[in-house]
Each structure stands twice: as C-alpha cells, then as structure tokens.
Amino acid sequence: MLFKNLPQNTPFKLFEDYYQNAENHNQPIAEAGCISSVDKDGNPHSRYVNFKYFFEDHLIFFSSYSSDKAKDFESNQNVAVNFWWASINAQVRLEGKISKCSEKFSDEHFYGREAGKNIAAIASNQSQEIESYEILEAKYEKIKSEIEEGIIKETRPEDWGGYQISIDYFEFWEANNDRLNYRESYKLENNEWRKFFLQS
C-alpha cells in the first residue's frame, strides 16, 4: 500500500505505523482488508480486497463497478473495513463512506499495472455466474492473444475503476495477556478526531 499526504497527528498516521510494523514483521499481503457492505434488503456481505493507496484521508482499492459489492455500495455508502495482522497480533477496524474515484485516477492506476491484471479485468464479468472456470480461462487467453496481435487495445473497461473510502472511525486493537486486550479508538466529530479507549 502506498501512503501519501496523510494528515499529521491523526489516526491516519497511526494506521501507517501499524501497517509498516506488520510489513516489517513479514505479514503476508498486509494490504488485504475485509470490507463489509449491506445490500438493499439489509443483508450484510464481506470480502477481502487489496487496498492500494491511502491518500490524504481516503483508503483506495480497485474493482468492477458491475459486481455484487458495487450494487451494495450504490444502495448504501456506509462500509466497514477490518485489517488483521497475525504477525503483530493486531487488527485495525475502520468505518466510513465509499464513493468512486475519478476516471483520471482510475486510468492512471490501470495503465500503470501489469498487462495480465488488466486482461483479467477486461475478461471477467465479476460476480456473474459462469458454467466453469475453464470458460473464463479461455476467455482470458482469447483477449490476451487479440491484444498481443493488435486486434483490440488494452483499454480500461468503463465499469472498472477505483473506490475511495472517507474514514470517520478507527479502532486499533492489540492482543494482550489474559485477553485484557488494548483498544484505542478515534471518531470524527465536528471535523475533529475524538480519541477514547474501549474495554476489552
């Protein structure tokens, strides 16, 4: 995950410290966080995504705008994210509102990626049913060949791009002896961060 222009003396910098500590302790895929959303009927859904950036006060990942989670985001902007880093026995919970990134920002990320990842984004209609995985593999290989032969261009799909979460709540949790765990929280109230602690 890339950090840039985080507000000083805020929980954003504390999050970066936790993240870097996890990476320094060889945490696999430290950028993977579980994001939870709610659909139009009030049913909760959770899945892991790889967060790529934390710019200013926005946590950012990329995905299909036609996926099931995208439909959840359209019906309810409120989301929760949980990072669990076993290497340091710590987790961070975040809450906030989600929205789409600009097309310009999505383009910059898409065209800076490895070709294989872009081909996957072009080939896959995320969350849609398919008869077998082999069909998706064949679709991927066909598009890959057509791009290599110049038949089609490696163009960002209109329904693929960035999502940004504007954070208004943090909880930093650390495992401790006898389950007397450490919980330090921050809540955005009237544009100010209120710090408080929670009992384990």
Image (cartoon, grey):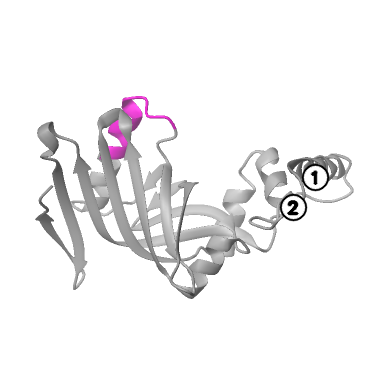
Circle 2 packing at 10 Å, graded few (<14), some (14-19), many (20+), is: few
Residue at 40% across / 36% down in the picture? 30
> SS for tag 1?
helix
Verify whether residue 23 appears in magenta. yes
Amino acid on which disc 1 is placed: Ile
Point out residue 177 in the picture as x, y percentages from the top left corner: 11, 31
- Looking at marks 1 and 2 on the same chain, the residue that comes earlier in the sequence is marked by 2
Read off the magenta span: 18-28
- Looking at the rendered structure, which numbered label has been put on residue 91? none
Point out residue 38 in the picture as x, y percentages from the top left corner: 44, 66
CB atoms at circles 1 and 2 under 8 Å apart? yes
Amino acid on which disc 2 is placed: Ile
Residue at 43% across / 71% down in the picture? 42
Q: Which residue is mark 1?
A: 135
User: Does residue 65 appear left or right of residue 80 in this picture?
Assistant: right
Whether 77 is drawn above or below 7: the answer is below
Residue at 55% across / 68% down in the picture? 71
Point out residue 149 in the picture as x, y percentages from the top left corner: 89, 41
Whether 195 is drawn above or below 191: the answer is above
